Image (cartoon, rainbow, N blue to C red):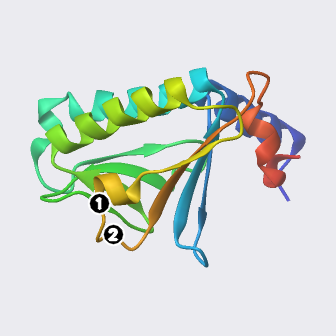
Amino acid sequence: MPSDKTNEATRREWRELGFFYDRDDQQKAWRIAGSKPGLEKFAAAISKFASNPRNGAQSEHDHLGPYMYLEIGSWPKPEITDHWIAGPLPALEQLAAQILARVRTAHENEVLPFREWYAPASPYELLIEVKPETFDPAKEDPQCW
């Protein structure tokens, strides 16, 4: 069992990230939950990765979050799998822009699916959950309480 100090560090990392993510292998979906500003940070993380030319080589990737199991990566075609959201850098930049646009017009508690738009043949869905402004991503993680 993690120490109180470790749990506090994990909570701080979720809050700095600005959103919570989890993977549901039964439903084959990534769940990204956050307030609008938090979800804008998620889009910004994708955009930051996509705008770095050093990430153009196949299989380059960044890990997100305290547990680092969600990856954003470069791949020849857009895909969402059990370990990453990947694609060519221009496609990832378009995904980031689409997330921003849809989140900005979404209603609180709306769930936005992205697989059909971004990578229809992918085995996993990408679900963006728009939470209230007061949303605390750390409170979604039962492991750090």
Residue 27's disc is none
Query: 6 and 74: which one is in front?
Result: 74
Image quarter in which the N terminus is found: bottom right
Residue at 69% across, 28% down: 15
Tell me whether the residue at label 2 lies in contact with that at label 1, contact meaning CB atoms closer than 8 angstroms.
yes
Q: How many marks?
A: 2
Rendered position, 59 above or below 50: below
Residue on which disc 1 sits:
119
Q: Is residue 129 left or right of residue 103?
A: right
Nearer-the-camera pick, 30 or 13: 30
- Residue drawn 51% across the image and 23% down it: 104
How far across and down, in percent of the image, does residue 11 sit? Answer: 76, 35
> Where 74 falls versus 136 (above or below)?
below
Would you name the residue on which mark 2 appears?
122
- For badge 2, the amino acid type reads Ser
Please rate how many residues cluster around mark 2, counting C-alpha atoms within 10 Å: few if below 14, some from 14 to 19, many from 20: some
Q: Quadrant of residue 8?
A: top right
Q: Residue at x 76, y 38 (%)?
A: 138
Q: Of helix, strand and loop, which one carries label 2?
A: loop
Residue 27 location (% of width, % of height): 59, 74
Q: Quadrant for residue 24, please give it.
A: bottom right
Residue 122 placement, left or right of 139? left
- Real-space Cα separation, disc 2 to disc 1, in angstroms: 6 Å
The secondary structure type at the circle numbered 1 is loop
